[in-house]
Amino acid sequence: MAPTTLDPHTALVIIDLQKGIVGLPGIPAIGDVIGHARALADAFRARGLPVVLVNVAGSAPGRTEQPPRQTGPRPEDWTDFIPELDRQPEDIVVTKRTWGAFASTDLEAQLKALGVTQVVIAGIATGTGVEATARQAYEQGFNVTLAIDAMTDMRPEAHDYSISKVFPRLGETGATREIVDLLQTRSA
């Protein structure tokens, strides 16, 4: 179902489109996801709306029940945002150590200080970072829209489950073109 509205104070939140994650093998449709995320970022920036770039550096402290996915040091540029996002000086940058971008960060405070009432969320991975951020945004009282063609997951079943079962309970879903069209209509 296409999104129906965007609040006047909406921010774009892009999750984990960073060199260390995008460079992993086997990520479905990553080129399309990057293109859609960039189109959203360009549209938000053109209208003076906040763009939040979120990266992940490590994991939550104290978790020992699962072995680390990576042993040894990560490359120095692992957390760097991919150049296709065209990071701008006015972009908000948030580094997280958990799945969601609101837990243990100041993202909520930064957005509320700007008067943001709605977030559009995109990125990797649909069933973890994107979904956790969407749940946290919803719990913090933000209206939530999810750009479903601007996200992917290495686990197709997790991607499909989040889109079909979880996201409709948290907010509206739609394609990048539909969200950009709403932005254009609103500012016309």
Image (cartoon, rainbow, N blue to C red):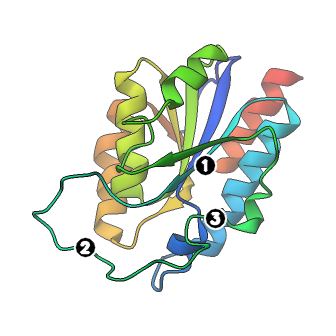
Label 2, label 1: how far apart the Cα atoms are: 34 Å
Label 2, label 3: how far apart the Cα atoms are: 21 Å
Percent coordinates x, y for residue 45 in the rendering? 82, 38
Percent coordinates x, y for residue 166 in the rendering? 30, 42
Identity of the residue drawn at 40% across and 21% down: 140
Q: Is residue 136 left or right of residue 179?
A: left
* Tag 3 secondary structure: loop
Q: Which picture quadrant has residue 158?
A: bottom left
Identity of the residue drawn at 37% across and 32% down: 136
Identify which amino acid the numbered label 1 is placed on. Ala
Q: Are marks 2 and 1 in contact (CB under 8 Å)?
A: no
Using the image, tell me which numbered label, if any, was put on residue 68.
2
Percent coordinates x, y for residue 92 in the rendering? 67, 38
Using the image, tell me which numbered label, if any, was put on residue 80.
3
* Tag 1 secondary structure: loop
Say which quadrant the C terminus sits in: top right
Label 1, label 3: how far apart the Cα atoms are: 26 Å
Identify which amino acid the numbered label 3 is placed on. Asp
Identity of the residue drawn at 81% across and 27% down: 185
Point out the tag, 1 or 3, that comes first from the N-terminus: 3
